[in-house]
Image (cartoon, rainbow, N blue to C red):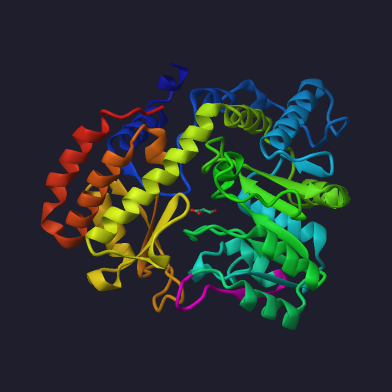
Amino acid sequence: MNLKKHPKIYNLIKAEERRQAETINLIPSENYPSKAVLEATGSILTAKYSEGYPGRRYYAGNEIYDKIELLAQKKAKEIFKIDESYHVNVQPYSGTPANLAVYLGLLNFGDPIMGMNLSCGGHLSHGHKVSFSGRAYKVIQYGVSQATKRINYDEIRKLAKKHKPKLIISGFTAYPRKINFRKFHQIAKEVGAISMADISHIAGLIVAGLHPSPFPFTDIVTTTTHKTLRGPRGAIIICKNKFAKVIDRAVFPGIQGGPHNNITAAKAVCFEEARKPAFRKYQEQIIKNAKVLAQELKKYGFNLISGGTDNHLILVDLRNKGITGKEAEERLEKAGIIVNRNTIPNDPRKPFNPSGIRLGTPAVTTRGMREKEMKKIAFWISEVISDSKSLSKIREEVRKWTICYLHT
Ligand code: DSN
C-alpha cells in the first residue's frame, strides 16, 4: 500500500479503521459506503478539472467526465422514479452547499423563506441565524406541536399565509416521523411559494418506497448522498425543469468551482447500488431496527420525542435521567457507543450542551446488526446512562462484540 510511505497519515487512517470497527455507530447521518463507492472516491478521476456542465466545459479533456456526469444524472432520475420534467445537478459538494445554491438561484437577498427551527429538527442551512441562510434572507421558522412533537400543518399554513415566504423548506435532520411532502407543497402553492424538500436523512427510505416521496410535485429536492443512501460524501439537487438553468448557474459558477469528478462517479455507483433488491431490504431493516431500539429504550424509562419513530432515527429527551446530552454523549463514547447530542423541541438548553441525544440505525444495519442486537445496544445505553462506573467494563464488551460484525 503506497500510503505506507506516509506513516503518520497511514497510521491515523488505520487507527480510525479500528475505531470504526470496535465501536457502535448510532449517528443517524453516518454510514459505511461499499468498497465500490470507496474505489470510485479514491480513483484517478480526482485529477481533473471540469468546470461547467456536460458539453459546456471550461477545460479540455472532459469527454469521459461528461459521460460520468450524465450517467450519474440518469441514475438519480431512475432511483427516484422521476421523468423528464425534472433536472438533476450532481455537482454539489455537500448538503449545505446544495441548499445555499438553491437559495442563491431562486431568491433575492432579504427575501422571506420558511424552514423548521433547529431545536425542532431543522438544519442550520434551513435559515438558522448563524448560517448564511439565516443572515442573507428573512427567515420565518416553524416548529412542532407542543403536545405531540409532530409537525402541525395547519400552523405552518397559518404562518405561510401571514408571512408569504418565497420558499418553504421541508425535510429535517432530527425528526423521527414521516413528513407529508404533499401537504408542504400544497401550502407553498396556496401562498405562491416555491416548495423545497431537503431529503438528506431519508433519501434511502424514499428510494425504497418506505417513506412518502416528494416527487412528482415538489419544485426543488436536495439530498446528500452519504446518509441512508450510503454513497460518497456529497449531494445532488433535483429541480423542475423550469428551474434548471438558475440552479445550474447557482452551483457553478455561483458557489462552487470544479466538480469533484471522483465523487460524481461514486454517486453513480451508489445510485446503481440503490436499485438492487438488497438495498430495499437494507432500508426495511433500518426501520425495523430503529423501532426495536425505540421500544427497548422506552422499557428502560427513556422519554422519546413523539413517543417513537417511523424512520431511521430516535430523539431522546434525557431530562428525566438527570444528564445532559453532552454528558451522555461523552459517557457513551467512553463505552464505545457513538451518538450525538441534540436539541429537543423548544430545548431550554443551548445546542452545544442540549437536553437530548439523537440515535440512528443506518450504520449498524449496514454492519449486519438486527433486532437482537438492538436489544443489546439499548441495554448497554441504559447501563451507561444510569451507572458511570460500568464504562470500562462495557467498553471491553463492546470491543469484543463489534469485531463479529461486518466492516467495509
Ligand atoms: N450534519 C448532518 C446531520 O448530522 O444530520 C446534517 O447535515
Residue 294: percent from left, percent from top: 34, 55
Query: Any magenta on residue 276?
Result: no
Left or right, residue 233 beside residue 248? left
Residue 167 seen in the current view:
no
Residue 150 place in picture, x, y as percent: 51, 69
Stretch of the chain drawn in magenta: 136-149
Q: In this view, does 89 lie above or below 390?
A: above
* Quarter-of-image position of residue 186: bottom right
Front residue (pair 403, 379): 379
Left or right of 117 on screen, residue 349:
left
Q: Which residue is drawn at 42% across and 66% down?
A: 306
The residue nearer to you, when weighing 28 against 153, is 153
Residue at the top extreme, as displayed: 1
Task: Residue 146: say if magenta.
Answer: yes
The single residue placed furthest to the bottom in the displayed view is 162
Measured as percent of width and height from the top left, residue 74 is found at 75, 31
140 sits to left or right of 31:
right
Q: Residue 317's image quarter? A: bottom left
Give coordinates of residue 94: x percent, y percent: 62, 46
